[in-house]
Amino acid sequence: MSSATEAAAAERRYIDALNEGMATALEEDERVVVMGIDVGAGGGIFRVTKGLYERFGPERVIDTPIAEMGYVGAAVGAAMTGLRPIVEIMFMDFVGVCLDPILNQAAKLRYMTAGALEIPVVFRMQTGAGKAAGAQHSQSLEAWFAHVPGLKVVLPATVADARDLMLAAVRDPNPVVFVENRRLYGSKGDIDADPLPLGKARVARPGEQVTVLTWGQMLRTCLAAAEEGDASLEVIDLRSLAPLDMETILASVRRTGRLLIVHEAIQDFGAGAEIAARVGDQLFDELRTPVRRLGTPTVPMPFSPDLEKALLPTSKAISTAAEALVAEG
Amino acid sequence: MSSATEAAAAERRYIDALNEGMATALEEDERVVVMGIDVGAGGGIFRVTKGLYERFGPERVIDTPIAEMGYVGAAVGAAMTGLRPIVEIMFMDFVGVCLDPILNQAAKLRYMTAGALEIPVVFRMQTGAGKAAGAQHSQSLEAWFAHVPGLKVVLPATVADARDLMLAAVRDPNPVVFVENRRLYGSKGDIDADPLPLGKARVARPGEQVTVLTWGQMLRTCLAAAEEGDASLEVIDLRSLAPLDMETILASVRRTGRLLIVHEAIQDFGAGAEIAARVGDQLFDELRTPVRRLGTPTVPMPFSPDLEKALLPTSKAISTAAEALVAEG
Amino acid sequence: MSTSVQASTTDSPAVPERELFATMALIRAFETRVAELYRDGEIPGFVHTSLGQEAVAAGVGEALADDDYVATTHRGHGHCLARGMDVDAMMAELFARGAGICHGKGGSMHVADPSHGVLGANAIVGASLPLAVGAGLSSKHLSQGRVAVAFFGEGAVNQGAFHEAVNLAAIWSLPVLLVCENNIYAEFSDSRTLTRVPSVVERCAAYGVDATAVDGNDVAAVYELASAAAARCRAGEGPFLIEAATYRWHGHYEGDPQPYKPDGEEASWRERDPLEVSGKRLAAVGEASAAEQATLREEAGARVEAAIERARSLPAPDLEEAYADVFGD
Amino acid sequence: MSTSVQASTTDSPAVPERELFATMALIRAFETRVAELYRDGEIPGFVHTSLGQEAVAAGVGEALADDDYVATTHRGHGHCLARGMDVDAMMAELFARGAGICHGKGGSMHVADPSHGVLGANAIVGASLPLAVGAGLSSKHLSQGRVAVAFFGEGAVNQGAFHEAVNLAAIWSLPVLLVCENNIYAEFSDSRTLTRVPSVVERCAAYGVDATAVDGNDVAAVYELASAAAARCRAGEGPFLIEAATYRWHGHYEGDPQPYKPDGEEASWRERDPLEVSGKRLAAVGEASAAEQATLREEAGARVEAAIERARSLPAPDLEEAYADVFGD
Ligand SMILES: Cc1ncc(C[n+]2csc(CCOP(=O)(O)OP(=O)(O)O)c2C)c(N)n1
Ligand SMILES: Cc1ncc(C[n+]2csc(CCOP(=O)(O)OP(=O)(O)O)c2C)c(N)n1
Ligand SMILES: [Mg+2]
Ligand SMILES: [Mg+2]
């Protein structure tokens, strides 16, 4: 029995589950490599890749210079030619220096070559506010990637998904943007026996009155809101923005008649808008109340923890918004 | 009487109006400079900056190497220190190599310095499909910029706005993403006597039954749809995504009870979703029919002109969608 | 550092000058006709021909093994033909036909044929470099002994992607052959004005990568150097850069009026027509008389003509093509 | 190219060693306490101290004129203090107070004070370079004679932004002083393993930019070189690069366990403590005895302590701050 299997029984941290996902991927497929700044000997700036270098060696767990355009592009080139790289962009904000290989190469070259190129690459990015990291280290830009045809976008919110979605992403023949929220790294939980496939949303908590749809780190806040508030909330963990599991969303909203979408990203032009627009269209006659969204207001994320806290959606704000919907109709 | 004033009387092309806007900006303010690849001696790859180099010299109209990260970043640095650069990113798709100065510097440094830095820079980007330019030269990514606090995003659709929004953008003390659609360059029209301010939408054609909201090159297609179809369409030219003139939109939809949003960008997670979500929420009780959107399907833009045409919204598709809304309720 | 690979007559394989000539003749015929077809509106989109630069494509192409990788640029027809891309399928692609090598979804700027190791032309300046580094990484990791070639223009050397990619190839000691076609111009600009160090060989010293300049209009010289360099790569000695001095006879794009070319410059380069340079040698050593050369050129012309006729007769892609190949499963 | 600026005793101004010492003492006191306050949870976010690198900040800072520009990095406290940033306002910023120099919206990684020419610390590696190039462009365009300094680490040299920005400064012959603090490490990595050419001075030859290496722990040497280099910039001779060899005593971030530092390395650098190198000289020439030096250091400590006391007593920003300064009007 491998140590991975033993560990599967016990509760663990999100960060360990990510690590385990990568370790399993490295173990089961020779072609898998891990790349990024200090992911190797240093074990990762947040220690997500701890031990992988020692276990799989410098040829499989590759330290890079601070040269994201170069090494992310190289990961894409390697994915076209037989490897299956998991490449880390340390903070999602840093895509500002390396979008081209994601936007114009990985996302498009399968299509442009009529399927002749396959590009199985995982772009790991750590995201999120709430740690006073300032405006250049706190952004949630998942909506950008969801807007680009050819990319899958997954956002594990639970310990189980940290491992399961990682494995699913590596096994997927397509480029996958894999969004980790730093605030989840220390969160604890169990591993599911039966992983949900990439592309399926999960009802994290059943409820009757309001469907609360969310992803990533906000799942915990929404679950807290469900505990604290008066309304009965059905909380859905979306898990992936592309593919987008409208079926699960629509089924829930058909029952509750109300939808509140919560995300940490800036609300304006955020990913919640797409879902609100679709549900508003497809369930026009069934909605009891308007679809509401709760995201961060349109300001860069300030450094001050107090200001940061004031801007991010809280469980109180979520339950209040949900109750307001119930009161509305 | 300057040649600019004389020209103001006659009909001209969109491309000339852009040029005129830049010329006037260069004339009226010493601090204005134009920067980009071949914008100088070469007059611009599409000839948008033709003659400016001869008229204002190489110090004001600056040719750059193919080094967008460097020169766009330099434009932002120059804007912080007294200049007012108009910097060209030849194709919007190329933001993949130079997003950081826009996303993390220009958009955020005023805020992070509590207003101590002012960053009056215009990012000109040419966009759009319909010219068989392929997937890496055809994208409309305006939704990305609208999602970033601190950026204004304007999209002139008319000849008048090509000049007026250019001047407004240069005079604005904030970073402005200025989106030009290549297919509009040759379009003709008059210059308005009375420019509408940046941030105001314009009712391009009054109508009764369906509000059709659009921007950029799709305005012409929507106007054609209004002519061709059976429904009475009120066509709104949004002109800017940030600021977003909800007032004009809501006023129109309150009257018509129906909204169709049309854009060339990929529909999924596009800018139309935000407006659909807001209208769906704010006019929940007043909408006669669901808010509909018409954008490009979720595929990279193929090279083939036939396929391209099949993917882009047509006037026929627009009038059909509008008529379907009228039939619905 | 700049001359460590010499074309030594003892080590090098015999120069297959007749094949090289034939390849150049094919490229010449192809590009000549493509320029005309583009002018006449038979080929849509953007087209950049490599007329005058045939010796680089032929010399490098012939020096490679069948399974080596090539990543190239917007000016990539010659490289593809030299790698044996099917002329029919390539011409059909430029015509945007469903039977095109990319089913009409790539076009001139994106022709690709992974089955011949051609990872594709690329419309983003500099993008070929990180992709080739990735291919080199695959080759090394999978112990395949395949060389990965990146073609790029001297204009791309100012891009960050060049800097980052060359450094990565160096520290990882990858089998990457960097081939810079220095044709003096980047669009409308003389590249010598866009850097203080116009010699790419000299700039390459910053990465500790060996580099050699070569007469890019002498196909034998290119072939010998590329053979030696590829052998070096294959022997595990790491990357190598070739700077081939050459000239594009036509404009940046077809139709470019080229006011930026000084009088006589193009004429003097045309005097050193790569086909004539090689042809003289062929005649001198008795390998192919002038008449035989004319026959080779006629055959090439006929091959291209047949491809054109075929392409003309082919249908546009089926509409379903527009939706295919976005994702694999 | 690497030694064209010599610290010549005849041309150079007298070295104000006492002031330099005092500045270093202030930085030392500030950073020492910041490290403790961060460990104790009084300062939030990310903190990167420059302990051990004080001579570079002090030497360059003192060599500049009052209105020169400085763009710096995540490790920018020293540079800001050396430019005269108010200690109180800066400490308050690190404490995320409303009275902070950025009203609590910037923090350690973004302290800025445009009134002292400080365009800001920056959390994106390499971003300081294009911004400084832009500031240099402003200075040249507006004939202001201001020098624009970019501080950056040797790790940033592998970024595309470095490559593009240095080339721009060169071809435009801008008054840009490039100051590379080579402290050996980029995060957990020994930068000598991330390039084949660890000498930044050598790499700089690729741009035709003159460059000189200096002992970054000798404040007088830094001062003399920076003075000469700034004078050269001001005289219109274009950019210049200084590579200052130094060492960070602490980890990449506060709390970094630093397993990557070889035994004895840090100790040997601590033996060359910049304050002691300078102090010995001060004592030797009779400018400041050991006792006087102790007093200077005590004064610095008291200044910092007062700033801390004050910062502790200050309130967090008003919530309205979160919404202010996104746009100017
Ligand atoms: C990132 C990016 N910037 C700008 C362009 C526009 N562009 C296309 S080709 C070209 C010139 C390239 O010059 P060079 O690298 O010398 O290649 P050549 O055209 O001479 O073969 C430019 C600027 C682009 N395609 N991509
Ligand atoms: C674009 C980007 N990539 C990665 C990082 C993460 N990061 C922050 S500091 C740093 C190391 C910088 O090393 P160096 O330039 O030598 O500066 P030093 O920390 O030694 O002062 C890295 C990788 C970042 N902030 N920005
Ligand atoms: Mg060129
Ligand atoms: Mg360093």
Image (tube, coloured by chain):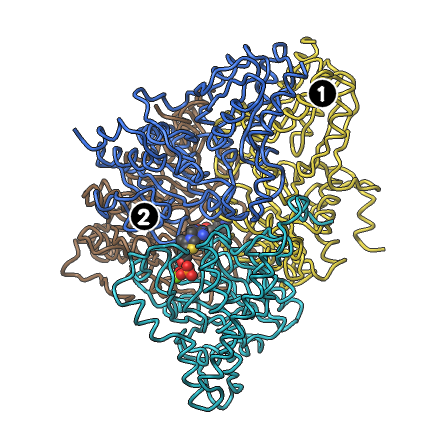
Chain colours: A yellow, B blue, C cyan, D brown
Query: Alpha-carbon neighbours of circle 1 within 10 Å: few (<14), some, or many (≥20)?
Result: some
- Subunit that carries the residue with mark 1: A
Q: Can residue B46 be seen in this view?
A: yes
Q: Is mark 1 within 8 Å of ligand 2?
A: no
Mark 2–mark 1 Cα distance, whole angstroms, equals 54 Å
Residue at the (54%, 24%) spot, across then down: B228
Residue carrying label 1: A283
In which quadrant will I find the C terminus of chain A?
Answer: top right
- Amino acid at the residue labelled 2: Val
Instruction: Determine whether, in the image, residue D81 is placed left or right of residue C165.
Output: left
In this view, the residue in front, C141 or C228, is C228
Q: Is mark 2 on a helix, strand or loop?
A: helix
Instruction: Determine whether, in the image, residue C110 is placed left or right of residue B46.
Output: right
Tell me, yes or no, whether dots 2 and 1 are on the same chain. no
Q: Is residue A209 above or below residue B297?
A: above
Looking at the rendered structure, the number of numbered marks drawn on it comes to 2
Q: Where does residue A313 sit, x and y in percent of width and height? A: 60, 24
Foreground: disc 2 or disc 1: 1
In this view, the residue in front, D188 or A141, is A141
Q: Is residue D46 above or below residue A276?
A: below
Q: Is residue D249 visible?
A: no
Can you tell which quarter of the image residue B263 is in?
top right
- Amino acid at the residue labelled 1: Leu
Residue at the (43%, 31%) spot, across then down: B155
Can you tell which quarter of the image residue B61 is in?
top left
In this view, the residue in front, D326 or B144, is B144
Residue carrying label 2: D133
Q: Where does residue C107 sit, x and y in percent of width and height? A: 55, 54
Query: Alpha-carbon neighbours of circle 2 within 10 Å: few (<14), some, or many (≥20)?
Result: many
Q: Is mark 1 on a helix, strand or loop?
A: loop
- Subunit that carries the residue with mark 2: D
In which quadrant will I find the N terminus of chain A?
Answer: bottom right
